[in-house]
């Protein structure tokens, strides 16, 4: 009876919804510190989950100088960009208070790393989230604080890419969404879980490949994801034809849209995940994108549905 009531109230929600986005992302993210307010929608990334770590790229030296002097950092997740039209003002979906702990400085700019101090889902979603947590997602090791932090982090769509690695006879292919590339540069950042069997091999060789993938390959992509913490399937057992990348000779499915061969130059232990920082040595575009896979939190998806502006499920 309880399960039946839950289904009536909530349907049968997954905590994360996979959607396809072909054009622009509707949501926006803003950083506030001191007198500085920045739209960081395209240059912020979730890089670790325990503790939750956010990376923010700043390429303006004056903005970086202000950030270097501040102690309090807040980011706001909103359902649309800021607008001068009062009738079109965005709704704030979630809030995070962050604390700076490290940075990576390059000639192109600086990647600032922040740990989560606290988060809040706003405004009416707090009660909705509380009900959802206790009726659907509560687990012995899953606190409401953690639920809020992940609901906040995934109030902005997180793109899924495919990672490839190869070392002699060993290879691995797996999807991930804790990653980002710096627009206008060859710089890339990744957050790989320590349980990933390929992690130490990637660090040893200093090489990996990241690929753009279409939402049409969703089922195959998630099948690959089941093997990232164990020994992967053999090349002959994969349900698709593959090819080798130009420089590294890493295997990729025939249907990838593009790929970048990355040299890893720096690693930082973030907790549950390891940060890998690197630069693309080779960039190849194979075909035009039809639309990519993104992960969003159920609460964002529900909010979009109430506004009748949700992304199509993948």
Image (cartoon, rainbow, N blue to C red):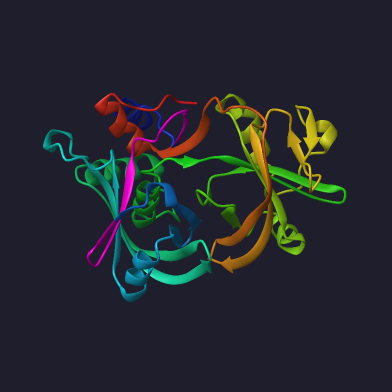
Report the side of 42 relative to 240 (left or right).
left
Left or right of 118 in this view: 244: right
Q: Does the magenta stretch include residue 93?
A: no
Question: How far across and down, in percent of the image, does residue 95 sit?
Answer: 28, 54
Question: Which residue appears at 32% of the width and 75% of the height?
Answer: 69
Vertical comparison of 56 with 153: above or below: below
- Determine the residue positioned at 59% across, 62% down: 274
> Which residue does the image show at 74% across and 37% down from the upper left?
252
**On screen, residue 144 above or below 293:** below
Residue furthest to the left in view is 86
Quarter in which the N terminus is drawn: top left
* Number of numbered labels in the structure image: 0
* Name of the residue lying farthest toward the bottom: 69
The residue range painted magenta reads 17-37
Q: Which residue is drawn at 67% across and 32% down?
A: 256
Residue 294 position within the rendered picture, expressed as x and y whole percent measured from the top left: 48, 36
Q: Main secondary structure of the magenta part?
A: strand
The extreme right residue here reads 169
Does residue 6 appear in this view? Answer: yes
Q: Which x, y percent locates residue 271?
A: 53, 65
Residue 15 in sight in this render: no
Q: In this view, does 162 lie to the left or right of 314?
A: right
Q: Which of 144 and 86 is in front in this view?
A: 86
Res. 52 image quadrant? bottom left
Residue 31 highlighted magenta (yes or no): yes
Where does residue 21 sit, x and y in percent of width and height? 46, 30
């Amino acid at each position: 009876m309880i399960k039946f009531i839950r289904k009536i109230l909530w349907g049968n929600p997954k905590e994360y919804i996979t959607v396809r986005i072909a054009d622009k992302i509707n949501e926006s993210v803003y950083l506030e510190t001191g007198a500085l307010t920045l739209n960081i929608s395209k240059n912020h990334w979730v890089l670790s989950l325990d503790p939750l770590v956010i990376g923010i790229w700043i390429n303006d030296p004056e903005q970086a100088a202000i950030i270097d002097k501040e102690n309090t950092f807040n980011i706001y997740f909103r359902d649309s960009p800021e607008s001068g039209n009062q009738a079109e003002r965005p709704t704030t979906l979630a809030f995070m208070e962050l604390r700076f702990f490290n940075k990576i400085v390059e000639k192109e700019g600086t990647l600032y790393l922040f740990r989560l101090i606290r988060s809040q889902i706003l405004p009416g979603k707090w009660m909705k989230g509380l009900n959802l947590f206790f009726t659907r997602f509560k687990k012995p090791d899953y606190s409401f604080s953690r639920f809020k932090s992940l609901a906040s982090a995934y109030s902005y769509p997180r793109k899924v890419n495919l990672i490839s690695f190869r070392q002699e006879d060993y290879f691995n292919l797996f999807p991930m969404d804790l990653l980002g590339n710096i627009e206008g540069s060859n710089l890339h950042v990744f957050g790989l879980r320590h349980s990933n069997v390929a992690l130490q091999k990637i660090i040893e060789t200093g090489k990996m490949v990241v690929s753009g993938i279409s939402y049409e390959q969703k089922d195959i992509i998630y099948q690959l994801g089941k093997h990232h913490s164990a020994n992967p399937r053999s090349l002959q057992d994969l349900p698709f034809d593959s090819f080798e990348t130009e420089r590294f000779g890493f295997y990729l499915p025939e249907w990838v849209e593009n790929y970048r061969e990355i040299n890893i130059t720096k690693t930082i232990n973030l907790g549950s995940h390891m940060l890998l920082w690197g630069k693309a040595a080779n960039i190849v575009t194979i075909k035009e994108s039809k639309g990519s896979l993104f992960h969003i939190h159920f609460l964002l998806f529900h909010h979009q549905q109430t506004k009748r502006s949700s992304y199509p499920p993948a």
